[in-house]
Image: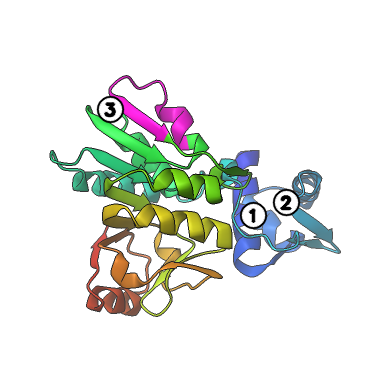
Amino acid sequence: MRREERFSLILNELAEVGSVSIADLAPRLGVSKASVRRDLGLLEERHLLTRTHGGAAAAGLLLDLPLRYGAGSHRAVKRRIAAVAIERVSGDVTVVGFTGGTTTTEVARALADRPGLTIVTNALNIASELALRRNLKLFVTGGIARAESYELLGPLAEAALRGFNLDVVFIGVNGISARGGVTTHEEDDAHTVTALLGHAQTVIAVTEGAKVGKVTFARICDIERVDELVTDGEADEAELAAIEAAGVRVTLV
């Protein structure tokens, strides 16, 4: 396992349970305890965790993984989700919106060769990948850059979004459930995504199954605002049934 892959696993574990132990990580990563200690030390230098006796804990509130680490997590699943999601961009769709996130990034990549689309996004990484595509017209919001997700957030981003009308918007989530709706960890993120949804005809949530049924801090919208959820078979079946009963089309990959 490459170092970046080990970093991704460690940070995902911290995001899920809040702490990790060297004794547990070593066999899972296939490396020595000394190697795990070095990995933890490097991640601490990047302010992504706090070392503890025998392991590490999340640094403060470890909420979203930096995109460069999260992108390697469940990459094959996210690409399958993207392959299905782009089928919703039919011939009469001309304007497509994207929020930030690793799964939405895969959807954007899958659409990169599609001619004649106008793309609207607040995600710097998506914008950088699409900026040189002559077949696309790209609009990027202003705003304050969020280091963890490369998103532009805040009043400036929200003001820019008020000027657009979008046929389809793909959103990434930290949690989605029938009870809690669509949620994220950060209030400013929720405000900006809500502004984007306010001008969208169709809203499609794309996320891996582990986030289905979760409810995080800041609500983006009620579940009824979502037209379709594209996720994988790891999602909780009862929660998927409840989401479907709320009127959301559920598609599994």
- The magenta segment is 126-139
Residue type indicated by callout 1:
Leu
Residue type indicated by callout 2:
Leu
Report crowding for label 3: few under 14, some 14 to 19, many 20 or more residues within 10 A (C-alpha).
some
The numbered mark, 1 or 2, whose residue comes first in the sequence reads 1
Q: Which one is nearer the viewer's eye here, 227 or 159?
A: 159
Per the image, the residue denoted by label 3 is 113
The answer, for residue 95, to whether it is visible in the render is yes
The answer, for residue 101, to whether it is visible in the render is no
- Determine the residue located farthest toward the right in the rendered image: 53
Does the segment drawn in magenta span residue 88? no
Q: Which one is nearer the viewer's eye here, 164 or 208?
A: 164
Q: Cβ–Cβ below 8 Å for labels 1 and 2?
A: yes
Q: Measuring 37% from the left and 72% from the top, which residue is drawn there? A: 222
Image coords of residue 16 (percent x, y): 59, 66
The numbered mark, 3 or 1, whose residue comes first in the sequence reads 1
Q: Secondary structure at mark 1?
A: helix
Name above or below for residue 246 compared with residue 54: below
The answer for how far apart the CA atoms under marks 1 and 2 are is: 8 Å
Q: Is residue 34 left or right of residue 198?
A: right
Residue type indicated by callout 3:
Asp
Q: Nearer the viewer, mark 1 or mark 2?
A: 2
